[in-house]
Image (cartoon, grey):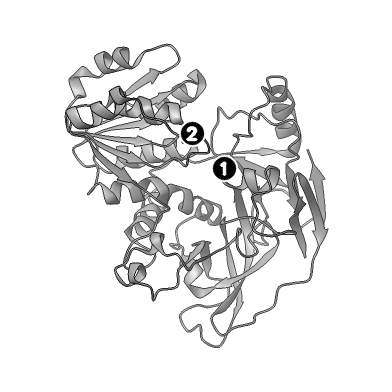
Amino acid sequence: MKSVVIHAEGDVRVEERPLPQLQAEDDVLVKVVSSGLCGSDIPRIFAQGAHYYPITLGHEFSGYVESYGTGVTDMQPGDAVACVPLLPCFHCPQCERGYFSLCKQYQFVGSRSEGGNAEYVVVKRANLFRLPSDMPIEDGAFIEPITVGLHAFHLAQGCEGKNVIIVGAGTIGLLALQCARELGARSVTAIDINPQKLELAKALGATHTCNSREMTADDIQTALSDIQFDQLVLETAGTPQTVSLAIDIAGPRAQLALVGTLHHDLTLTTRTFGLILRKELTLLGSWMNYSAPWPGEEWETAARLLAEKRLQLALSLPIAAMRKALQKQSKRLMARPCRAKFYFNFPDGTSQQPALAHISFRNLAFTFRNPSFKLVTVNYQANQYELI
């Protein structure tokens, strides 16, 4: 089979690898149809962030069950599934309480074991979520990133009737925005520095948008004065500046869910810390996307919203069109980490797509900011691949 393999920092290759074999009774062989490139994969590719090399990444994927071990009794060949990448131990004190995201003895598909950026992958039965019969197989690869925002809503006791504010209109933020809209939020606000992302947020249902490059925290608070109470703020950008901004713009007794992962130290000024106290903010750390019963209500909700076609996800383009788009965007490179969101689509035998590899990307206003990044697109049906 073909697999997209990371051999070292920045060394991405498409190569032939043996078909993975079932080793344990709870193993399942999956034929991958669609696999995503997550922002967390970028340091694994470019910053020596992988647990080992060589490794096949990919923890956001969907596909069909091919075969399984003797201990798997609730699946059939051809079942459509999505990856649940975390594999907790299920026995530690955290797991016994249903705090699966907090397990310290876990495995993770596409990080600590081989992932779904390949034609086939073997995972545990617990790593698979059965897709509704009326859901397109490609959409199943979006369930994992959708559940990130849903987990924050879960920890905040829901978003119904609340004024939800999303700080960071990237992939996670825009998916959370749509979920909040569909789950009964009173209003949904998007805050970002990118006007294209804010336009996209409006198109996806944001009731308010604020450009934090052009507006101060005081300006934003003034603009949102009519929704200053009953706020649930999600910080999804994962930068020290946006964490501080989220605290600054949060209303009285707001809930602040910290979703984004920081890669630089955060220093709070005495003023910012004082705002947490004086506004009586509730801070919620939100880590991954799991709850009890396994893998959690987040996954059921994401699948339901997708099956009911209540979320807008992606645009698919042929390789030639995507190449032109990337070439156009590459002229704006600013030597920052890659922030695009891409999907590898591996057409199956029932696909109505032409026999040409496609890339689906979730953010129509994406930016591609790392000139050294080579996006590998693979057409397994045609037995060929292409590097862009």
Q: Is residue 84 left or right of residue 113?
A: left
Looking at the image, residue 192 lies above or below residue 213: below
Q: Which residue is mark 2?
A: 170
Which residue is depicted at the point 71% across and 48% down? Answer: 354
Q: What percent of the width, then of the height, locates residue 190? A: 37, 27
The quarter in which the N terminus is drawn is bottom right
Q: Which amino acid, by three-letter code, is at mark 1?
A: Gly
Residue reaching furthest bottom?
70
Above-or-below relation of 265 to 101: above
* C-alpha distance separating marks 1 and 2: 10 Å
Seen from the viewer's position, the closer of residues 289 and 262 is 262
**Residue 295 lies in quadrant:** bottom left
**CB of mark 1 within 8 Å of CB of mark 2?**
yes
Question: Residue 266, how many percent across, how many down?
Answer: 44, 33
380 or 338, which lies in front? 338
| Element carrying mark 2 | loop
Name the residue at 50% across, 77% down: 75
Residue 110: image location, x then y, percent: 61, 59
Residue 67, compared with residue 366, is above or below; it is below
Residue 122, picture quadrant? bottom right
Q: Residue at x 74, y 30 (%)?
A: 371
Q: Residue furthest front?
A: 270
Give the secondary structure at mark 1. Answer: loop
Determine whether 76 is above or below 100 in the image: below
Disc number at residue 39?
A: 1
